[in-house]
Image: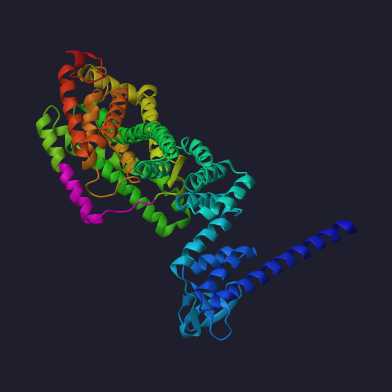
Amino acid sequence: MRITIKTIIAALLFLLATQASASADLADAAKGLLSKKYSDKIQATEAIAASGGARSAFLLETLLEGDLYAIKSDDRLVSRKKVNDGYQITDIITEENLGVVKSSDLSKIRINNKMRGLIKDLLGRLTLLNEDPALRLKAADSVFKSRPKEMIVPLGDALEAETDATVAAAMRRALAALNFVHGDTSEVQAEALLILEEQSNPEVKSLLSAEANRLAAIQNPSPENQALAKAVGDALAKVDEKLAMLGIVENVFQGISLGSVLLLAAIGLAITFGVMGVINMAHGEMVMIGAYTTYVVQELCRNFAPDLLVYSLVAAIPAAFIVSGLCGVAIERSIIRFLYGRPLETLLATWGLSLILQQFVRTIFGPTNKEVSSPDWLSGTWEITGGLALTYNRIAIIFFAAAVLLMLMLVLRKTAFGLQMRAVTQNRRMASSMGIRTGWVDAMTFGLGSGVAGMAGVALSQIDNVSPNLGQAYIVDSFMVVVFGGVGNLWGTLVGALSLGVTNKFLEPYTGAVLAKIFILVFIILFIQKRPRGLFALKGRAVEN
């Protein structure tokens, strides 16, 4: 036990001595920054990076950002922070708090453009060996973009010591770019090309394209340059092929994401349209009410329960369903039930109601857009490769839409209310003669459809601005989905939403967003001429007669 304790104490003393020695080396190296000659400052900068001190990277970052100062009275290097009565200064080496001084007591350590480039390269070297994998990954990406020749050796050393697979792949790509650009022999460049052509990254494509253009501009190229040009062209073609495949995957994902949004916005409309035959032009406003409910819930959490803010989006889902659902029931009981069998009057009445609701929201919340922040678990992207990144919020919307559809399927097939709703959909008069209160079913169905639209507003608040006009952007697309898929059929709504979403995303790069929608609308018009009941027509006596 005594030996163990002595060993531990000796190790601690050695560590403290090593740290003290490194700090002393860093302090000695940093003194050169006080010189007025930039040549001395450059030597000092290189010495700082070579000192191995724990504060070396921080000192260089502070110097690069222009936040490094010297106390005029004793030449100590410090960083400063503005306070009420002056500047709070901290020793850049020891992190000692030195109190508050006036601006006139400090002199700024100035650098030129040559030093800035040197510092960036030195920081890259230091960061490549950082304990944090995220910082090493960032450093590798930075080296790939800047491609300084002097980073070939340190990057190779860092790659040999790297244990993280993701970071190692980024370092390998960066080292290949360095060897390709600065390689001394054609063999080195050829080996680098073999690595680069396996990448699916737009930045690799830019690198190879620039080199291909350079080689093409050479007059009377040597056989070696001709061989290199062919190799670069072949590698560029392979990268283009991989990026094209990733582009297809991204378009499919974006299309499914858009289709999920359309599904959420249209699924409630499909229910009300299918059961009641009502063309509800105010359905988009139910989506808008759900989005504003999300905003209100988040503001309540922000002002009265900040610790619960991270859960505000989850809490907004049932709140938006209830608020929009109650609004739907109120609309059906006060307006819609008096207009059954009069589609033109219903269309005009709900269109006027949509304008009233928009103005009502403007009066309460104002005409400007409201921001609904995303929780941390919905922020950011999932970067599969350099050419394909999927945002977490759209992934969540896809799963959310699937969950809502599954919930509605269970309600329609496993509950008494769902059975009654299907009965009214297929034959209203027969259902009424069997004792089903069709008026009650109509009200609850309208409320259910409006509630689902409110949940769609929760999802849309994460990818779109919350404004009084939010619902208007999706009402036409929702009707197209319902008509194309088949009125009142949930499976048809799903297929219609995904089909239109994916098709729209593949058309947009060639036609633009507006023309893409026009083409889809023309297609649907032509389609319903052949199939008036949509892809999946409902079966029932009322439908068939």
- Residue 532: x and y in percent read 17, 19
Colour scheme shown: rainbow
Give whichever of 399, 131 is nearer the camera.
Answer: 131
Give whichever of 214, 538 is nearer the camera.
Answer: 214
Q: Is residue 151 visible?
A: yes
Helix, strand or loop: magenta stretch = helix
Q: Is residue 523 left or right of residue 15?
A: left
Which residue is drawn at the image coordinates 57% and 43% (left, top)?
168
Magenta stretch, residue numbers: 353-373
Q: Is residue 180 left or right of residue 133?
A: left
Give whichever of 15, 306 is nearer the camera.
Answer: 15
Q: Is residue 285 left or right of residue 419?
A: left
Quadrant for the C terminus, please.
top left
**In which quadrant of the rendered view does residue 271 lie?**
top left
Quadrant for the N terminus, please.
bottom right
- Residue 238: x and y in percent read 42, 32
